[in-house]
Amino acid sequence: MSGSEQEAARQQHPLVPDQQAPADTDKSIARHRRQLTVAIRDALGELNIQMSVLNRRFGGRIELRDVDWTCLHLINRYGPISPTALARRAGIHPATLTGILDRLQKSGWVVRDRDPDSPDRRAVTLRPVRERNAALFELFSGMNRRMDVLCAEYSESELEVIADFLRRTTTAGQESAEELTGD
């Protein structure tokens, strides 16, 4: 990275230190690292709030509750999926899931198909109605456009680091949620 690129990076991301190691003490380096870690946690907290607001507004447009939208997203991403696997992924009690699935099916977002591989004739799999996804894509188009613009500001290697960080953060969140449920 050239000197002008470093300066541009510092202006755009003020918490990014110089690429050349300063002659600071170990104490100031540790303090700076703590500040960066706190800044990341704060930013993730703000991201969580903004994504919750976006998801509530999104759900309001397509008449889905937050938890319904979460389940629909999981079915779209991992389906066909069994209700048991969906309940586990969403962190929802299976009895609660029944009402959610009833609403999603009634609204035409999902289909319950009999599971042909199960010896239990009552077993079903959940399948998204992919034809309805155009409505989802349209509602998220503004956010997707903004994310494309944002990602264009980063190099490939920076995007790889960001993607890795987000995957590892997701894993940390999953592990923490499992600890809280006692699973």
Image (spheres, helix red, strand yellow):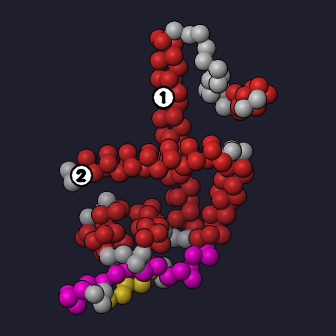
Q: Residue at x 65, y 69 (%)?
A: 138
Image spot of residue 53 (x, y percent): 54, 52
For disc 1, the neighbor class at 10 Å (few under 14, some 14 to 19, many from 20) is: few
Report which residue position mark 2 lands on: 181
- Quadrant housing residue 102: bottom left
**Quadrant holding the C terminus:** bottom left
Q: Residue at x 57, y 83 (%)?
A: 131
> Does label 2 or label 1 sit earlier along the sequence?
1
User: Does 8 sit above or below residue 129?
Assistant: above
Give the Cα distance between marks 2 and 1. Answer: 26 Å
Q: Residue at x 30, y 84 (%)?
A: 124
- Amino acid type at circle 2 is Thr
Can see residue 72?
no
Image spot of residue 8 (x, y percent): 76, 30
Magenta highlight range: 118-135
- Quadrant housing residue 57: bottom right
- Quadrant housing residue 21: top right
User: Does 25 sit above or below residue 117?
Assistant: above
Report which residue position mark 1 lands on: 38
Q: Residue at x 44, y 45 (%)?
A: 169
Image spot of residue 26 (x, y percent): 48, 12
Look at the numbered disc 2 and give the secondary structure of its residue.
helix
On screen, residue 117 versus residue 1, left or right, reads: left
Image spot of residue 145 (x, y percent): 70, 58
Q: Nearer the viewer, residue 163 or 104?
A: 163
**Quadrant holding the N terminus:** top right
For disc 2, the neighbor class at 10 Å (few under 14, some 14 to 19, many from 20) is: few
On screen, residue 144 versus residue 47, left or right, reads: right
Q: Is residue 127 magenta?
A: yes
User: Does 183 sit above or below residue 122?
Assistant: above
Q: How many marks?
A: 2
Q: Residue furthest right?
A: 4
